[in-house]
Structure formats: C-alpha cells, structure tokens
Amino acid sequence: DGSNFIRTLAPRKQKPTMTASEIPNEMKRLVVTSAGKGTSVADCTIEVETVPTPTPKSGEVLVKVTAAPINPSDYGSWYLSKADSYPIVMGLEGCGVVVATGGGLTTYRCPVGTKVGFVCGGGKQGSYSQYVT
C-alpha cells in the first residue's frame, strides 16, 4: 500500500536468495480474530490465515520476513479494538531479505538479496507474515 518504510541493513550487492518461480502464490500470516473477554492479550483468539502473497508495485519491494519482534504497543490494538475491526493483522515492524522488486528506483536502491528492516503501515499487512511489500 506504499506506506511501509524500508531501511537497508547491509551492503546492497548480494546474491539473490530465491528466484521469482520460488516465491509462493500464497503465504501465511497471524491475525487476531477476536478479543475474547477483552480484558488482556491472553484472551485474544489468534489464527493462522492463508492469503495471496503480495506483489510489489512500482517503487515497492517484496520482503521475505526473517524476524518480527513482539511490540508492547501492539497489545492494546489486539484486545481493545471494536468488534468490527477484526481480523487484525499482527506486527508493526520486522526485518528480512528482498526477494522481488516492483521496478522503478527500488530495483537499484534495494535489489534482490538486500537485507532490510521495515515498518508496516496502513494496517493491511503485518510483520507476522511470511512476506510483506
């Protein structure tokens, strides 16, 4: 959705880690599907969801997520949100490796194989996903 922030973590020229044909059509991600009793994070219902793997648009990259922290700022959104906001994608930031580019400047600034850190924005993708754009 263009609102993610990408930061390069390592030298830019690296060998590609996977080919385009190795990127799956579908991926898994964690989502909170209900707040349960709504009194703590422990009450939340968390499920694994299978969704299409995102395709990077021009100016975006596809990142294979290798790590995503548990961020205390997530907790409230998981169990204090309104009922109509579920499912909620989980995770605000993470790191990984660029596996595809959508063209444009990202092809040169973050080529395939680049290690990056990212912040998810817009609430449509979460870092507890196998891939993010």
Image: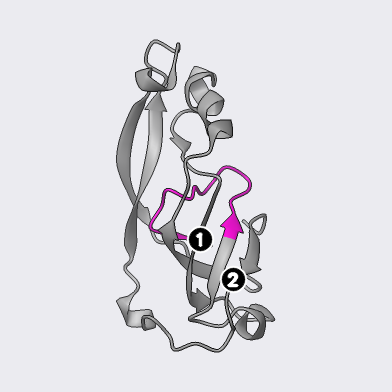
Main secondary structure found in the magenta portion = loop
How far apart are labels 2 and 1 at the CA level? Answer: 9 Å
Mark 1 neighbour class, 10 Å CA radius: few under 14, some 14 to 19, many 20 or more = many
Whether residue 82 can be seen here: yes
Q: Residues within 10 Å of mark 2 (few under 14, many from 20)?
A: few
Which residue sits at x=48%, y=19%?
Answer: 83
Label 2 sits on a secondary structure element that is loop
Is residue 132 toward the left or the right of residue 66 in the image?
Answer: right
Is the Cβ of the residue at disc 2 closer than 8 Å to that at disc 1?
yes
The furthest residue to the front: 10
Image coordinates of residue 92 in percent, x first then y, are 55, 45
Q: Position of residue 49 (x, y in %)?
A: 32, 44
Q: In the rendered view of the protein, which quadrant contains the N terminus?
A: bottom right
Residue 40 in magenta stretch: no
Was residue 132 drawn as part of the magenta stretch in this picture? yes
| Highlighted magenta segment, given as a residue range | 118-133
Looking at the rendered structure, the kind of residue marked 2 is Leu
Q: Secondary structure at mark 1?
A: strand
Residue identified by numbered label 2: 9
In the depicted structure, whether residue 102 falls above or below residue 32:
below
Above or below for 115 versus 54: below
Q: Position of residue 46 (x, y in %)?
A: 34, 32
The residue pinned by badge 1 equals 95
Residue 111 in which image quadrant: bottom right
Q: Quadrant of the C terminus?
A: bottom right
The residue at 43%/61% (across/down) is: 65
Identified by mark 1, the residue type is: Cys
